[in-house]
Image (cartoon, rainbow, N blue to C red):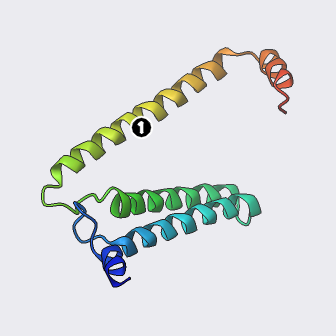
Amino acid sequence: MSERRHATSAPLPGVGHLSLRAYVSGFVASLVLTIGAYLLVVERAVSAGTLIALILVIAVSQFAVQLVFFLHLGAEARPRWRLAMFLTMVTIVLILVVGSLWIMGNLNSRMSMPEQEQYMSSQGGL
């Protein structure tokens, strides 16, 4: 029993100083941030502008928790490789998000109001 306990409290291989306790802390922090964002939206406790600002703050916090606890950015002897991988990931995500918003904006501007209403009624929307 003591061997098993020792194995779970020891740092994980290739991770450095992070242990199971750090992973659990990261998981709990992620869970709290996710539930907090959900409750803010569902309960509508604040105005729309404040809600957007709070959701952005929670998203950045969630992002930081993921980087530190799960991606271990900066936790290795040579963090440049992970930083390069991280920057590549951010670039790809930005391309996807900006491209999607650009496509939706173009589709919205090229669709007339009757076409929009017809599409929404056929989809069971508003």
Q: Position of residue 12 (x, y in %)?
A: 28, 66
Quadrant of residue 119 in the image?
A: top right
Position in image of residue 124 (x %, y %)? 85, 29
Q: Quadrant of the C terminus?
A: top right
The image quarter in which residue 85 lies: top left
Disc 1 crowd rating (10 Å Cα; few below 14, some 14-19, many 20+) is: few
Camera-side residue of 71 and 90: 71
Q: Amino acid at mark 1?
A: Val
Left-right relation of 39 to 6: right
Q: Is residue 101 above or below residue 39?
A: above
Q: Quadrant of the N terminus?
A: bottom left
Q: Name the residue furthest left.
A: 77
Along the line of sight, which residue is nearer the eye, 71 or 1? 1
User: Which residue shows up at 34% across the image and 84% down it?
Assistant: 2
x, y percent for residue 21? 39, 75
Element type at mark 1: helix
Q: Badge 1 is on which residue?
A: 93
Closer to the camera in the image, 102 or 11: 11
User: Is 124 positioned to the left or the right of 16 in the image?
Assistant: right
Number of numbered tags placed on the structure image: 1
* Residue 118 percent coordinates (x, y): 84, 18
Residue that lies at the very extreme toward the bottom in this rendered image? 2
Does 33 sit left or right of 70 as displayed? right
Residue at the image position 64 percent from the left and 56 percent from the top = 49
User: In the image, what residue occupies the spot 24% across and 72% down?
Assistant: 17
80 up-or-down from 18: above or below: above
